Image (spheres, rainbow, N blue to C red):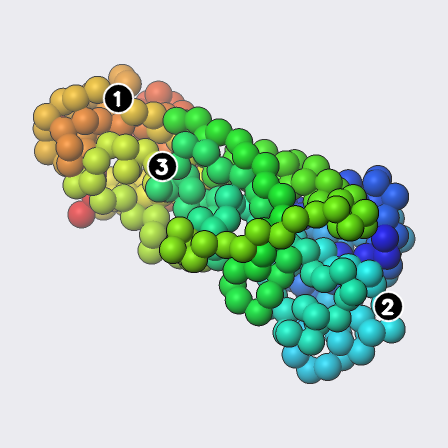
């Protein structure tokens, strides 16, 4: 089929690559504008643009889709279908309804659960045991269109959002190829979403990263792994910010929430009396390191209270 692909981050790259390998004609790629990155604030193209340029595909990077310019371009391109994967912009109705075979979105959750911008992270933060990807026809709502195909994967007790991101990215790449194959054959079934089963996964905010040690050990551990690699869970340690990159659940200790109850291993008690083991930490201004290495340069006393 003749396609236009819309996507921006690394998550979307395998989808674009698999679509090309399947023999579809991608006549254009739409992605977010280049952004300054690094210490020198050099303009850096998004990962999808880098992939498109490698394959010689024309790239468009409009600041908005609402001024009519993108619509005019797409009318000239005449795609059979538009594929949207983590593009980061809302498509106006006139673009959604432009291609004859519709706009297909790859969403990183098992819809209707976790509609919104951060489904991967909230699945982990909320302690879900499984996740997946869903392809759907786009409509004018927020991830509310008719579902097409799904693929599931399990979330381990220590799986981080970053690890789940990579697995779902690969799952999505396989699923979009299957979806396009069935769409082209005219052999695909639409299924309406049941709104009563939906929940929203809002964009992450750095304020979310502060650990509340009064919560259960499960909740604290899920927050730590759910905010990895960004924005990273954090707490206060002797007046400084301590980022916690990796943890695992430990046993019951019955001490105060936030109290350091062991140094080797580095155990902190939570509100339900159970502890989490801090495996990798990073004090403000310092590098990320294993907890054992952290103790060599930063003496910690038992009964120290984290947070506050």
- In this view, the residue in front, 81 or 299, is 81
Q: Is residue 77 left or right of residue 50?
A: right
Q: Would you call the spot at circle 3 few (<14 residues within 10 Å), some (14-19), or many (20 or more)?
A: some
Displayed quadrant of residue 234:
top left
Residue displayed at 72% across by 62% down: 102
Q: Earlier in the sequence, mark 1 or mark 3?
A: 3
The residue identified by callout 3 is 127
Residue displayed at 27% across by 44% down: 211
Q: Earlier in the sequence, mark 1 or mark 2?
A: 2
Displayed quadrant of residue 66:
bottom right
Q: Is residue 239 left or right of residue 225?
A: left
Rendered position, 302 above or below 203: above
Mark 3 residue element = loop
Residue displayed at 51% across by 44% down: 110
Q: Would you call the spot at circle 1 few (<14 residues within 10 Å), some (14-19), or many (20 or more)?
A: some
The residue identified by callout 1 is 250
Q: How many marks?
A: 3
Rendered position, 8 above or below 284: below
Q: Is residue 172 left or right of residue 109?
A: right
């Amino acid at each position: 089929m003749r396609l236009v692909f819309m996507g921006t981050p690394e998550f979307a790259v395998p989808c674009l690559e698999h679509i090309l390998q399947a023999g579809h004609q991608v006549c254009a790629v739409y992605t977010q504008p280049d952004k300054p990155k690094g210490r020198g604030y050099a303009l850096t193209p998004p990962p999808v643009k880098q992939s498109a340029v490698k394959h010689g595909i024309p790239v468009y990077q409009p600041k908005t889709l609402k001024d009519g310019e993108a619509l005019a371009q797409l009318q000239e391109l005449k795609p059979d279908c538009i594929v949207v994967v983590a593009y980061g912009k809302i498509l106006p109705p006139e673009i959604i309804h432009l291609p004859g075979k519709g706009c297909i979105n790859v969403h990183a959750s098992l819809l209707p659960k976790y509609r919104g911008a951060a489904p991967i992270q909230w699945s982990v933060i909320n302690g879900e045991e499984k996740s997946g990807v869903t392809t759907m026809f786009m409509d004018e709502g927020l991830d509310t269109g008719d579902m097409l195909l799904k693929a599931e994967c399990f979330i381990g007790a220590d799986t981080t959002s970053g690890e789940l991101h990579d697995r779902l990215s690969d799952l999505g790449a396989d699923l979009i190829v299957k979806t396009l194959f069935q769409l082209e054959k005219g052999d695909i079934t639409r299924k309406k979403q049941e709104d009563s089963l939906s929940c929203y996964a809002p964009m992450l905010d750095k304020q979310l990263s502060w650990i509340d040690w009064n919560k259960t050990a499960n909740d604290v551990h899920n927050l730590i792994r759910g905010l990895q690699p960004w924005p990273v869970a954090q707490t206060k340690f002797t007046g400084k910010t301590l980022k916690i990159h990796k943890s695992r659940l430990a046993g019951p200790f019955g001490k105060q929430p936030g109290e350091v109850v062991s140094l080797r291993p580095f155990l902190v008690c939570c509100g339900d009396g159970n502890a989490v083991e801090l495996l990798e930490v990073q004090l403000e201004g310092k590098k990320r390191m294993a907890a054992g290495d952290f103790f060599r340069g930063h003496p910690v006393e038992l009964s120290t209270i984290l947070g506050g």
